[in-house]
Structures are given as C-alpha cells and as structure tokens.
Image: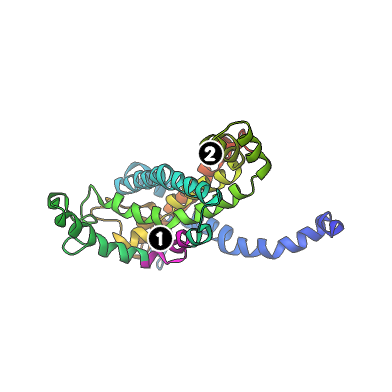
C-alpha cells in the first residue's frame, strides 16, 4: 500500500476520473461563461462581440447589481458574527460530555438535512403578516405595533431571510467543530485542569487553538455559501421587495432566464466565482500563521 501511495503515476490514475468529472461540471462551464460574457446575446440569436462592455456596465451602471453585492456581504458578516460563534459554543458544550450528547447532536443536525425550499416556505408562513407566528405572538403580548410584513418591508426583508439561513446551517458547522473538539487529546485537558484552569480557560487556551484548522474551513465555507446564496432567498423573497434582498445569484438567474441576457448574466456568474476565489485566498492568508497541527 505504501508503495502505491508513493507512486505518482498510480496516484494520477486514481485522481484522473474525479478530475475529469470536476473539469466537465466546473472548469469547462466557467470558461464557457467567461467566453459568453464578452458578447451581447439573448441565447438564441446572433452573438455580438462587445469585449468587456458587460463588466463595465456591471460595475459602473447597474445599481441593482451593486446593491446585491452589498446584500451578499451583509449576509456574510451576519453568518460570521452569529452562525459561527453559536456553532463553536454548541460544539464545545456537546464535546464536554453533557448528558444526552448524541440526542442533541442529532437534533441540531436535522435542519441541515431539510431542503432549503421547504425551510423557506415554512418561514414564509412564520413571517406571514396576518396569521404568521411572529405577528400573532407580538399581538398576543401587546406589542402589535412591532408587527409588520417582515418579508415585504424593505428594511427587514434581508434580515428576515437571513434568519433561516443561519438556523439551517448551524448544525452543519457545529458537527465539524464538534469532531475537532473531540479529537483534542484528553491528557491536555486533564493537565490544564490540574494546573487550576477552569472550563472556560481550557476551552480558550487548549481546545480552540487546536481547532483552528477546522475553524478556518468553516469560515471559508460560510463565506462562499453566503456569497453564492440563492435557494433560500429565491424561495422567500425572490430578491424583493424592490431588490432589498437581492443577491448576485438571484439577479443572475433573473437576467439569464427572465430577461434573456445571456452575455450579461454570464458576466455576473464569472464575478461570483472570482469573488469566492479571492476571498478564499484572503482567508487562507489570514489563517496561515495560526494553523496548528495536531
């Protein structure tokens, strides 16, 4: 086995099928989109070469696209500030060996297994202005003045649509972080305990530093997931009202399949990919000095 793993030709043979599939569904379509982005094209008629004009319009004239970038960054910041800390806290609590550990782990992971479309429709009922759970509750406790059409209000639509996204994926990142916390050698915990460190000190001084590689992975996945978010936003608001919750991905879909601007929509797709790659490289750079091998 060691001889096979050390043979570069053998490794190439095993990797090649996966690489071909990856190239067919990711790399080649990306280059095709980049090619189409240099044309003015409706997807059926003649293509008119316009160079980088689509990108100029995208960044300097299309205020809806600029708004969608701001919304995606807002979603990214909210997930990093809310979802990741909650996942870390839950992972540390469960990894500490509480009673019913397996039950809570399973319950927290259930939302991950549900379809985003199902969750989106569920929360649409919760946010419903007349009989939705939130407004009914506010009216029942005398706070009816706070009730509002959460998904129909330009000031609240983005935040209301963000809540189920955060709720759905907490369990996924919790499970990754839980596995990392469980892999920390018990001897280190016991040694710190003998030195007088309490639970919080052990978590911050021993466990969290050793979880850094997994935290980095979670941060990258959170950022990429937020920047390309589509299904939940599309199900709940469709990017509305008045583009208040628009994401680059939802605007791209409407541009491609509603306005039939395939060239312009392809430029949006290329931007989303490049944006995700750049931010991934930045996160890799930020975490590079803090990587811990264990």
Q: Which disc, if any, is residue 51? A: none
Tell me the SS state at disc 2: helix
* Front-most of residues 121 and 199: 199
Identify the residue shown where x is 47% and y is 65%: 113
Where residue 128 sits: x, y (%)? 21, 62
* Front-most of residues 222 and 275: 222
Identify the residue shown where x is 16% and y is 63%: 130
Could you tell me what secondary structure mostly forms the magenta stretch? Answer: helix
Q: How crowded is mark 1: few (under 14 residues within 10 Å), some or many (20 or more)?
A: many
**Vertical order, 22 against 85 (above or below):** below
**Can you tell which quarter of the image residue 151 is in?**
bottom left
Where does label 1 land, which residue? 262
Where residue 283 sits: x, y (%)? 54, 40
User: In this rendering, would 75 be left or right of 213?
Assistant: left
Q: Nearer the viewer, mark 2 or mark 1?
A: 2
Q: Is residue 117 located in the magenta-colored stretch of the structure?
A: yes
Q: Where's the N terminus, which quadrant?
A: bottom right
Task: Tell me the magenta residue range.
Answer: 107-118
Identify the residue shown where x is 45% and y is 62%: 107
Q: Which disc, if any, is residue 199? A: 2
Farthest residue in the top direction? 195
* Front-most of residues 259 and 225: 225
Q: Distance between the residues labelled 2 and 1?
A: 56 Å
Does label 2 or label 1 sit earlier along the sequence?
2
Q: Is residue 126 located in the magenta-colored stretch of the structure?
A: no
* Front-most of residues 54 and 67: 67
Q: How crowded is mark 2: few (under 14 residues within 10 Å), some or many (20 or more)?
A: few
């Amino acid at each position: 086995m060691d001889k096979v793993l050390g043979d570069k030709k053998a490794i190439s043979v095993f990797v090649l099928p996966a690489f071909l599939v990856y190239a067919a569904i990711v790399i080649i379509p990306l280059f095709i989109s980049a090619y189409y982005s240099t044309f003015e094209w409706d997807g059926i008629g003649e293509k008119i070469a316009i160079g980088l004009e689509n990108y100029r319009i995208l960044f300097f004239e299309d205020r809806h696209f600029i708004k969608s970038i701001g919304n995606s960054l807002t979603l990214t910041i909210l997930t990093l500030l809310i979802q990741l800390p909650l996942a870390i806290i839950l992972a540390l609590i469960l990894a500490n060996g509480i009673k019913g550990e397996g039950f809570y782990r399973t319950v927290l992971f259930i939302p991950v297994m549900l379809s985003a479309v199902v969750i989106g429709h569920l929360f649409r009922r919760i946010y419903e202005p007349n009989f939705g759970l939130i407004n009914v509750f506010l009216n029942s406790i005398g706070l009816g003045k706070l009730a509002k059409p959460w998904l129909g209000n330009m000031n609240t639509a983005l935040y209301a649509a963000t809540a189920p996204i955060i709720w759905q994926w907490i369990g996924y990142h919790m499970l990754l972080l839980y596995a990392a916390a469980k892999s920390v050698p018990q001897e280190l915990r016991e040694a710190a305990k003998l030195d007088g460190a309490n639970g919080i000190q052990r978590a911050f001084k021993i466990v969290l530093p050793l979880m850094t590689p997994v935290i980095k992975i979670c941060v990258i996945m959170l950022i990429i997931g937020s920047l390309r978010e589509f299904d939940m936003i599309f199900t709940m608001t469709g990017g509305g009202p008045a583009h208040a919750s628009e994401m680059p991905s939802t605007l791209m879909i409407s541009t491609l399949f509603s306005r039939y601007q395939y060239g312009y929509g392809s430029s949006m797709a290329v931007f989303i990919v490049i944006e995700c790659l750049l931010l991934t490289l930045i996160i890799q750079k930020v975490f590079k000095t803090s990587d811990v091998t264990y």
